[in-house]
Image: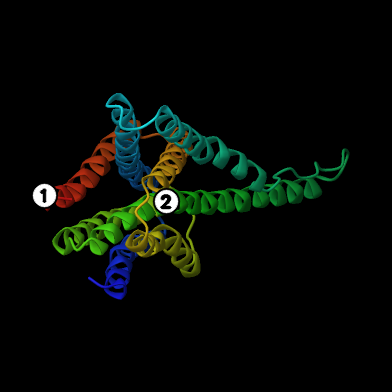
């Protein structure tokens, strides 16, 4: 399989993330529907967290096994451990710090004491409008953060596609592409689910799709020419930390809305759906 063929198929695997994104344009969704979509996305993200952590631990464990057999020195295992720890911290604590600094200031001036009732009402309405706008901006920022975390995960998937294609394992590469394409289709729901009643623009959806799905294409190009386990571990670690941070943010927001039992059922459904799509890859030997 040539590099150009690998690039086209890698792009196809990443493009399917756009299938679930138009759902974010639906308006007039009630609280129960918003909770259902958000918690379904949490289920998908929970599987992605388990998936990337498992792959990262496999690379780390290989280094430890090499040390136990005397095939490698302690520096290899320690270096991989530090890489994983720093990557996880960058994806979780680092992302939280970045998000806090990007958050717009929501404070407004209080109305002048002794003012008229009309002036007070206008000031309260203005303050409410500012708070609503800030909430919408924060929801869109959260959606792009989710897309970024998914993109890191998909970059590592793209690496697997590229490595398989470059080594002549065309059958495995094909199965990976089909499996990842099916799996990525569910990730679009993970991006737009937590938006709530915020209706994104088509431009925002296109940007979110590129951030989340584009790395599959880029990873396939990198994997075709470079087979680096430390590189894969770094992306797995950062992705795991970022996904965990995003899950915490969505969970905290949904607790204030209510419908706890419904949310937990949809969380389980999202998790099982992601597992089923991943089993396509496993069935094909990926």
Residue 272, x across and y down, in percent: 21, 41
Quadrant of the rendered image containing residue 268: top left
Quadrant of the rendered image containing residue 263: top left
Is residue 157 placed above or below 250 in the rendered structure? below
Is residue 210 placed above or below 34 in the rendered structure? below
Is residue 87 placed above or below 173 in the rendered structure? above
Marks 2/1 in contact by CB < 8 Å: the verdict is no
Quadrant of the rendered image containing residue 73: top left
Q: Nearer the viewer, residue 44 or 210?
A: 210
Residue 260, x across and y down, in percent: 35, 32
Q: Quadrant of the N terminus?
A: bottom left
SS for dot 1? helix
Q: Which residue is mark 1?
A: 283
Residue 86, x across and y down, in percent: 51, 35
- Numbered label attached to residue 44: none
Q: Which residue is mark 2?
A: 152
Which residue lies most toward the bottom here? 4
Residue 45, x across and y down, in percent: 35, 43
């Amino acid at each position: 399989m040539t590099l150009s063929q690998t690039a086209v198929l890698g792009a196809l695997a990443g493009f399917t993330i756009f299938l679930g994104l138009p759902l974010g344009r639906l308006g007039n969704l009630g609280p129960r529907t918003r909770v259902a979509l958000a918690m379904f996305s949490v289920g998908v993200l929970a599987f992605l967290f388990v998936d990337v952590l498992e792959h990262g631990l496999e690379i780390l464990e290989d280094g430890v096994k090499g040390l136990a057999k005397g095939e490698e020195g302690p520096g290899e295992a320690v270096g991989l451990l530090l890489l994983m720890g720093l990557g996880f911290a960058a994806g979780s604590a680092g992302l939280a710090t970045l998000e806090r600094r990007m958050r717009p200031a929501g404070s407004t001036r209080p109305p002048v004491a002794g003012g008229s009732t009309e002036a007070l009402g206008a000031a309260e309405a203005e303050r409410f409008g500012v708070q609503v706008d800030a909430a919408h901006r924060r929801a869109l920022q959260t959606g792009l953060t989710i897309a970024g975390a998914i993109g890191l995960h998909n970059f590592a998937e793209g690496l697997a596609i590229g490595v398989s294609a470059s080594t002549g394992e065309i059958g495995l590469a094909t199965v990976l592409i089909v499996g990842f394409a099916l799996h990525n289709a569910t990730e679009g729901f993970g991006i737009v689910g937590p938006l709530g009643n915020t209706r994104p623009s088509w431009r925002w959806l296109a940007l979110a799709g590129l951030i989340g799905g584009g790395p599959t294409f880029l990873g396939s190009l990198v994997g075709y020419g470079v087979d680096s386990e430390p590189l894969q571990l770094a992306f797995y670690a950062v992705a795991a930390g970022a996904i965990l941070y995003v899950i915490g943010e969505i969970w905290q927001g949904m607790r204030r809305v209510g419908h706890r039992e419904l949310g937990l059922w949809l969380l389980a459904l999202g998790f099982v759906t992601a597992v089923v799509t991943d089993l396509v890859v496993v069935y094909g030997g990926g």
